[in-house]
Image: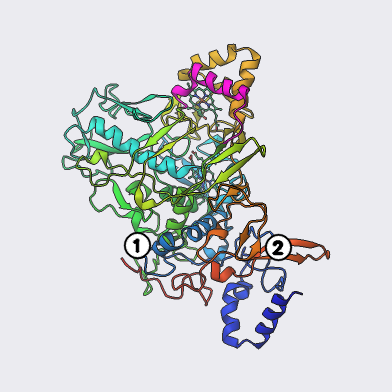
Amino acid sequence: MNARDLARRSFATAASVGLLLFAASWSAGRDLVPSPERPGGSGDDPIRRPKDLTGMSIKCPRVRAVSSADTAEEGATGYLFARDPWMAWARGREMFLREFSAADGAFGEAGKLGGQVLEDQATKMMNRDHVSSCAMCHNVPFRDAGAGVTIQKNSGSGRNTTHAFGAGLQETLGWQLRLKILERGDINRDGWIGKGEADRVRAIVDNLPAAVGGERVSVDFGTFGDLDGNGKPDLNPVCFIHYVDHEGKRISWARGLGEPGVAGYTFEVQLFGWGHRKGAVAPTLRAFSANAFDMHAGLQAYDPILSEEPNGDSLAHVSLAGMPQFISGRTRDRGVVKDDRGVSREDPDRDGVLEEITSGDLDLIEWYQLNHPSPAEKERTAQRERGRRLITTAGCTSCHVPDWHLEAGDPGNPDYTRRYLGDRRFFDMPVAWNPETARLEGRIERRDPAARAAFTIRGVYSDFAHHDLGPAFHQMQYDGSVLKKFRTAPLWGAGSTAPYGHDGASLDLDDVIRRHGGEAAASTQFYAALPEGDREAVLAFLRGLVLYGVDTIPCDVNADGRIEPHFQVAGMDTGLERCNPEWLFRIPGRIEGMVLNPDGVRVQSFALTNVEEAYGGRLKWLRDDDGDGFPDARFATPGK
Ligand code: HEC
Ligand code: HEC
């Protein structure tokens, strides 16, 4: 036993009952309730305080986060974003990785069919309450927002789990695409598209402005009018339509331009997920996450930010991280009845647990995904470079658009279609091949979210439009209706995410490319007719577009231009420099260092000796001494 352990033990013996009780809330307070946290280190009693010497497990007890824009409210989300953004990020990741328990409200309707109804208006889209954690599906790589399994959804042929690397950039692009499409079609700038206003106008958007270098593609998102006469605008299905009256107010029940009172429409660009014919999954990470918590884990959020529509025009509130939300993302728990703490008593799944997910929790998981690093590219060998050129020659990049430019934020522009959001992330982590060390290496570039700078998304390889790739990709849904169009799969990360296609039915890259037909027939034929060496080059190019372990790959965290083999944090040698968010907390995590393991072997322990302090466990809005999962400071939404 080392001196620190001894000190801790004697301290514990001498401690007052009050202190012990306090410690209990951070360790053993929940030992009667099954909980997945492992805050302990080598010196801890493994039963009283579960340990994990890799330091990779969740360390904090589940405490519902409190949303507040007021940065003076210690421990609420606004404070965390402004004062301790990495801790907010780590806590957001915990929301993604945590295996929620029944005590947290997981499940309640396990195994039931749920979700939206398909075209026959009765068949449910999926089954629900099947896993207790996002990471059960999104687990390649494990512990990041990775890709993963194929699940029962939409169709007996299933849906494959997409990854969310770089998801924040895509979300911001989604809003920008919406504005750029409106810029074409909303000629009188009243905020919506009137019938007849722009019927024959094509919604064409360029990926890059003239000043930014790269491969140029103009993407055609369809026409604004109903030229095919099916009662709906002919915009690409990535645009989810809301019909409005002559004042631009949403008519919730309207399903077509011909219905009584409909004067036009507005829309959301829903660029997440593979695609559905109608019905919103979600245009934003916040809404997607709230829906995923409910559908997959039976955890319902109560979130006024998603659920209120102040102007009746389909827009909900703007999240703390700066993303405008849509009413399509409204949560199942509306908070109509509240208790004296301000906690919603609705409990839609009737499992007795209230506010299973809070607005603050959604702030955190949104923050995590918004700032999730993007996929990387391995070495551009001569062969891979040839493959890269060939995908342009073959016409792949007419859909798999390589780059997109995010315009700088401009909230005050008198033309609302130019009020871009800009880059809202607090850091970027470019990952590139280092030929000297022959490995991928990252670098942390801090960014100021308030600066709302421009940013060019490189190498995403998608136009985010939906296309018909012919019968081999058509998906018959449970009810017999057939989905023909799917979103162009972004190819970043594709080297790590087999199997391929919305149904995960193509087990390798060659197979999924050859499966392309329909709108992609010409480029597939081009690919198939290439000499084998050229096809190999295309595949080599794609195989080099990879995901990686965000907190495990070597990374220059402190921007000194090198990756240190013995990176010092809080006086301890943490080994190879890497982006463990704990190293970057306002109060950095201090690791245990060398300890004896149960086999009597010396090992490096990454358990933290200051878990509670580093993770802000005593901050007003995070402190939960009674262990009920709600902060003791109660819940009346501060600053609102
Ligand atoms: C049971 C498996 C499963 C679980 C659990 C799960 N997801 Fe997913 N996720 C999927 C599948 C499948 C898709 C693709 C869905 C589609 O398009 O039909 C997806 C897509 C996504 C996307 C869209 C990414 C993109 O660019 O297309 C996001 C974001 C996402 N999930 C977030 C989450 C979050 C947050 C959680 C936890 C609250 C979660 N998911 C839990 C299976 C899962
Ligand atoms: C007309 C637009 C279009 C063209 C051209 C096109 N693709 Fe695709 N691609 C798509 C769409 C849409 C999907 C998703 C289909 C689905 O899963 O339903 C896709 C999926 C893929 C996937 C699977 C990715 C994943 O994560 O599952 C790969 C790989 C791919 N395309 C490579 C190529 C290559 C290489 C070419 C050129 C030879 C090409 N594509 C041409 C639209 C296109």
Q: 10 Å neighbourhood of mark 1: few (<14), some, or many (≥20)? A: many
Q: What element carries label 1?
A: loop
Q: Where is residue 181 in the image (x, y as percent from the top left)?
A: 29, 32
Q: Which residue is drawn at 34% across and 67% down?
A: 337
Residue 38 falls inside the magenta stretch: no
> For the residue marked with disc 2, what is the amino acid?
Ser
Question: Which is nearer the eye, 437 or 516?
Answer: 437
Q: Which residue is drawn at 34% across and 58% down?
A: 304
Q: Residue 69: which disc?
A: 1
Q: Quadrant of residue 178?
A: top left
Q: Residue 213: which disc?
A: none
Q: Where is residue 101 in the image (x, y as percent from the top left)?
A: 58, 62
Sooner in the amino-acid sequence: mark 1 or mark 2: 1
Q: In which quarter of the image is residue 47?
A: bottom right
In the picture of the structure, the residue carrying the numbered disc 2 is 605
Give the residues in magenta. Answer: 377-400
Q: In which quarter of the image is the N terminus?
A: bottom right
Q: Is residue 265 left or right of residue 108?
A: left
